[in-house]
Amino acid sequence: MGWFRDARFGMFIHWGLYAIPGGVWNGASVPGAGEWILDGGKIDPAAYTPLQGQFNPVEFDAEEWVRIAKAAGQRYIVITSKHHDGFCLWDSRVTTFDVMGTPFKRDILRELATACEEGGIRLCFYHSIMDWTHPDYLPRRAWDPRDPEDADFDRYVGDMKSQLRELISGGYGRVGILWFDGEWEKTWTHELGLDLAKFVRGIDPSIIINNRVDKGRSGMAGLDADGEWAGDYGTPEQEVPSMGIPGTDWETCMTMNDTWGWKTSDTNWKSSEVLVRDLCDIASKGGNFLLNVGPQPDGNIPPASVERLRAIGEWMEVNGDSIYGTSASPFRRLPFGRCTQKALPGGATRLYFHIFDWPVANASGGRTLVVPGLESPVTAARLLGATAFACEATRTDDGWSISLPETAPDAVASVLEVDIEGVPDIEQPATMPSANGALTLGAADALLTGHVRFEDRCENLGFWVSADGVARWFVRLAVGGRYRVIARMAAAPGEGGSHFTVASAPSPASQPSVNGIVPECKAWCDFVEVDIGEIELLAGESEIIVRPHTIAGSALMNLAWIRLTPTDSAASTPPPGSK
Ligand code: FHN
């Protein structure tokens, strides 16, 4: 996985016959992503496959695509060799439903392989297991008039393996990743996934295989941590796991607008600022960013995509060291931005702070970045993009503060490089009791995993749509004891009745958790405060964890805060293992 972890940033390319209709069929706009038009438009495959006779991307230039990717700082390309429609972008001997059967008659993947080889970019293939047009794939689409009795799924798997062999050892260079997809239908099984991964390894053991070769993807989260699934890394899609996926390689794939394949009507482009911060966010959690382009039927990457990639590349030109070959932040969270880290020779560590919010002027008019909780000695600090400015590092009670110039070198994300002795020694931030001993755990301070997120609208945790959504806070207590738990929460009419638990870890002997029931309110932001019982906390640092028990409606609840107030019976409970 070495090159994958070094690369951190890749280009996803969704290209095929679906670019021709671009989301419109028989004059009508078809809902959904551009590459799903056969399904979204319930098109008879026999009416779709003749698109092959129109595919003639005369402006396709593999070297230009590689130039665009390199200029953006992308170090690998994952292109759809075959998407769900079954059309093959290379000269396949297994089928005539390929690019050689089009007016274009050029092996696109071979030209791209040559350009990648010359450009020093890793070429990888996205390959769909699901195939809507292959005569032997099952299940058929519901509207497909072909008789499923004529299909032989084993024969389909044999064809797919033959095509993978063509791609792996057919002269398309050293394939970096086989990026499987379309694994979710019932005909594809865990056994078939294991077998396919073994088949690929048998041809080239160095190929990286994603988790979608098997059945280990849990929704868009991309990874099912349990179970023995085949695949080298997780593939969250259109989202960034809030806490990363510790101990696992993973890659977030994301569109720049809303569609993977070209769709003329989709102009909902993310800004380059958002995309640069996504890149920093993903790297700070230890992941890769696979950012998609959907080329037009003429063979050009959409200008709106090129424009954003150029802006990202300009940022990477100055700050790429803070992304390439880095690993996840040692900080649970930072108030001003993100952090990545890199080991230095001799056991030291280089921290890269991505500063999204430039510090305001301090009392003396200067600017200082306070790095909370950093205990390690700082040996050097410099600002990428403004190295002439001499950053001064000063030890403070809460960590280190580092002087900065008045103006940020980059309005989107300025990078401060800080060298420290040894591995990072961090006193992680934790909620401390207020004067009356109460602990207030606000939505904005929660560390989130799974399907739950912070909503500015009412400063709450919301979109808590799945049992994998977990909110946690760290608290630090001088003495332990029992606490009354009050939750300020809301659920719209008809959405009440969900159950959740509030637990502490490490769990004291008695009362380690309490259960709550979500009341029905007038609206999702019509909060009420409910006493849900008592919990015991130990002295020292504890985690308070809130997770769904049963979600009765469309979502668990909206949660504004949890407050823990010492009860009369609060007694000093020594921390575990203390005398
Ligand atoms: O159905 C595909 C979709 O078209 C696209 O290829 C994405 C990219 O990861 N994968 C599937 C949806 O999860």
Image: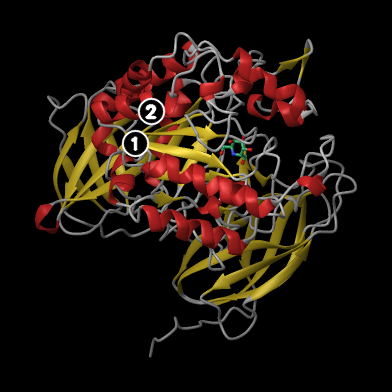
Give the residue at x 78% y 42%. Answer: 524
Q: Label 1: which residue? A: 171
| Lateral position of residue 570 relative to residue 8, left or right | right
Q: Label 2: which residue? A: 110
Against 90, residue 129 (above or below) is below
Give the residue at x 64% y 27%. Answer: 35
> Residue 426's quadrant in the figure?
bottom left
Q: Is residue 367 visible?
A: no
Front residue of 20 and 302: 20
Q: Dot 1 surroundings within 10 Å: few (below 14), some, or many (20 or more)? A: few
Q: Amino acid at mark 1?
A: Gly
Residue 459: x percent and y percent?
Answer: 63, 40
Against 159, residue 67 (above or below) is above
Q: CA distance from mark 2 to mark 1?
A: 7 Å
> Residue 409's quadrant in the figure?
top left
Please report whichever mark, 2 or 1, sits nearer to the chain's N-terminal start: 2
Residue 394: x percent and y percent?
Answer: 18, 45
